Structure formats: C-alpha cells, structure tokens
Image (spheres, helix red, strand yellow):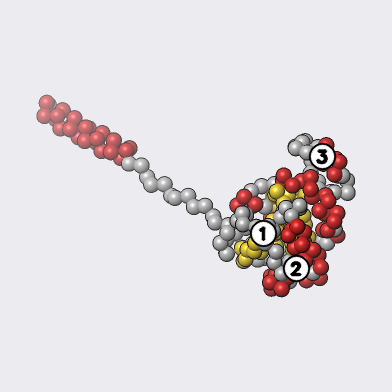
Amino acid sequence: MLRQLIVFSAILLSTAATGQVKDNIVPAKAAETKTDYHQPGSPMPALHVATFDTLKRSKRFLRQHEGDSSVPLTKVLHAKDFDNKGNLIVMMFNPTCGHCEDQTDRFEKNTALFVNTRLLLLANLTMKAYLPDFIKNHKINNYPMFTIGMDNGDFIKETFLYQSLPQINIYDKNRKLVRMYNGEVPMDSLKQFID
C-alpha cells in the first residue's frame, strides 16, 4: 500500500510540475503592424471631414464660438461620402498659405477636367476661423466636385510629411495611394491623375 501511495504521489507531482512549466510558457504575440500611409499602394486612412455653411456662419460668428464644441458643424463627411468612379485628390493646406491659394487657383481654372475625379481640400481644425474667407475668395463651394473642410480625425496626422504646403495625395478609385506631391504642383503634372 505504501508503495502504491509513493507511486501515486510521484505521478501527481510530475503532473503538477509539468502543468507549472506549461503555465510559465507565454505564447508569442503577433507583432502589431502599423500601416505606413506614405507608401504608394497603401490604403487611405479613415477620413472624417467637418464642413460648415459659410453663408450662415460669418467670421464674427466663428470668432464668438471658437473652441465651443456645442456649436454643431453642418455635417461630417466620411470616406463613403467620397465614393466615386475616379480618383480622389486630397490637398492638405493652410488657408493663410500663399502657395496653397495659388494651387487652389490652378484647380479652379481647370474644373472642366474634373469629370470623375473629386478634390478634397483638407485643413487642420485649428484653421476653422480662416476657412470662411478662403472659401469666399476662391468660391470653392461653386464646384460640386470640390469639397473643403477640416480634418476631424487623424488623416493629416497619418499622412502629412511635414515638408511643405500644400501636400497633395492622390488616391485611385480603390482608395490606394498613387502619388504624393509637396509644394505647388503644375497642372501638367496632375492632369494624368484627373479624369
């Protein structure tokens, strides 16, 4: 009987020791991969664009309500709102930047080229007070293929190269990055991406 008790104890202890070894083994975690949105072929990051009706919201109104999150924007657009059969050109800009204004003028003069391609002018939320004058001066709202708004997400954070303004990202109809430009770009260089 004593022998059976010793054998049983040995088996029980070996099982417990084996169980402890298994408990101490930590399975390797899959390495988290962060998408590099600067590489051609990379997907477009999430898009949240806040727009407002500048005719109803004067510069004075915006100054009075600056930073007041209770004042609703007219609408927030997402990637699905930019689904079209052509490319999407996203121009990250500052409404007080002369180069950005010049690039916007180039787009305005070539609106006839934009049949399927859409253009999104995207500014940082901190530029909200300057957008009404920019829109008024450039009449962006007169062209249905152009949208102007503020980044209400992390699009600029994920894609901006911090080299120069404007930065133009071109996405194909599947919303994969085709090309990035920094600074002013002649329309001859952009025409190949506009249909």
- Residue occupying the point 62% across, 66% down: 178
Mark 2 or mark 3: which comes first in sequence? 3
Quadrant occupied by the C terminus: bottom right
**117 relative to 172 in the view: left or right:** right
Q: Which mark is residue 116?
A: 2
Q: Residue 177, how many percent across, how many down?
A: 61, 63
The answer to whether one can see residue 146 in this image is yes
- Residue occupying the point 49% across, 52% down: 33
- Residue occupying the point 54% across, 55% down: 35
Give the CA distance from mark 2 to mark 3. Answer: 37 Å
Mark 2 or mark 1: which comes first in sequence? 2
Which is closer to the viewer, label 2 or label 1? Answer: 1
The answer to whether one can see residue 82 in this image is no
Compared to residue 119, the image places residue 11 above or below, namely above
Which residue was labeled with disc 1?
167
Q: Residue 76, how many percent across, how many down?
A: 75, 48
Mark 1 or mark 3: which comes first in sequence? 3
Q: Secondary structure at mark 3?
A: helix
Give the CA distance from mark 1 to mark 3. Answer: 27 Å
Which residue was labeled with disc 3?
63
Compared to residue 39, the image places residue 96 above or below, namely above
Crowd class of label 3 (few under 14; some 14 to 19; many from 20; radius 10 Å): few
Going by the numbered disc 1, the residue's amino acid type is Gln
Going by the numbered disc 2, the residue's amino acid type is Asn
Q: Residue 62, how many percent across, how many down?
A: 82, 41
**58 relative to 165 in the view: left or right:** right
Crowd class of label 1 (few under 14; some 14 to 19; many from 20; radius 10 Å): many
Q: Residue 151, how many percent across, how many down?
A: 70, 49
Q: Secondary structure at mark 2?
A: loop
Which is closer to the viewer, label 2 or label 3? Answer: 3
Q: Quadrant of residue 59?
A: top right
